[in-house]
Image (spheres, helix red, strand yellow):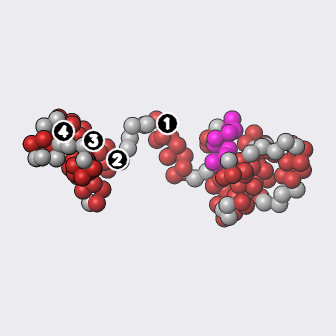
Amino acid sequence: MRGYDALRVADDVDDISSRTTSQSDPSINGLPQCARTPIQDAVVDDFVKQHGLSGNIDLFVRAGILLQADCPVDQIPNITDAELQALELETDRKWKQPKTLYFTILVCSIGAIEQGWAQASMNGANLYFPEEFGIGSSDFKDTLLVGLINSAIYLSTALV
């Protein structure tokens, strides 16, 4: 909960209102009335100050308005054409993703199939190979060897 201290709403709304009306930052006070509230102003201001992001306050103000206000997207102050285009693409074409993302999903899926296949094979082999190689007793050394053989695929993959 400590990381979210800047996002909590204070109990005393009058205190927040009095702090935000005395701010001199034009990027916060210059917003249209539909896009700002005293609580939002205080939360954004506290967050950027606490995390040393004061140079990006305009970006955080726009993000806060986008997430919490009922203003149309094109009326958010200082929004760039690139941001408008990205928001339109996000809502109109949800499934348009980079090809590298699909490639990564494919590679991970094939890896998961291979892991399941190897694990199922080892589980079946566990029934027979310990006795065949003379390591089927409940001795600590034999149990350790069987465990190492079973985990060799995963340990070697982790090393790579």
Give 20 or 118, whichever is nearer the viewer: 118
Viewer-nearest of discs 1 and 3: 3
Q: Position of residue 124 (x, y in %)?
A: 17, 35
**Residue for badge 1:** 91
Q: Kindly identify which residue carries mark 4.
A: 126
Provide the secondary structure element on which disc 2 rests.
Answer: helix
Q: Earlier in the sequence, mark 4 or mark 2?
A: 2
State which mark lies toward you, 4 or 1.
4
Mark 3 → mark 2, Cα distance in angstroms = 16 Å
Find residue 23 and report its image quarter. bottom right
Residue 62 belongs to magenta span: yes
Instruction: Tell me whether circle 3 and circle 2 mark residues in contact (CB < 8 Å).
Output: no
Assess whether residue 64 is covered by the magenta stretch: yes
Q: Which residue is mark 3?
A: 112
**Which percent across, then down, holds residue 113?**
23, 39
Query: Which numbered dot is residue 107?
Result: none
Q: Which mark is residue 101?
A: 2
- Eye-nearest disc, 2 or 1: 2
Describe residue 148's horizontal placement relative to residue 65 as left or right: left
The magenta stretch is 61-71
Q: Quadrant of residue 157?
A: bottom left
Question: Local crowd at mark 3 within 10 Å, few (<14), some, or many (≥20)?
Answer: few
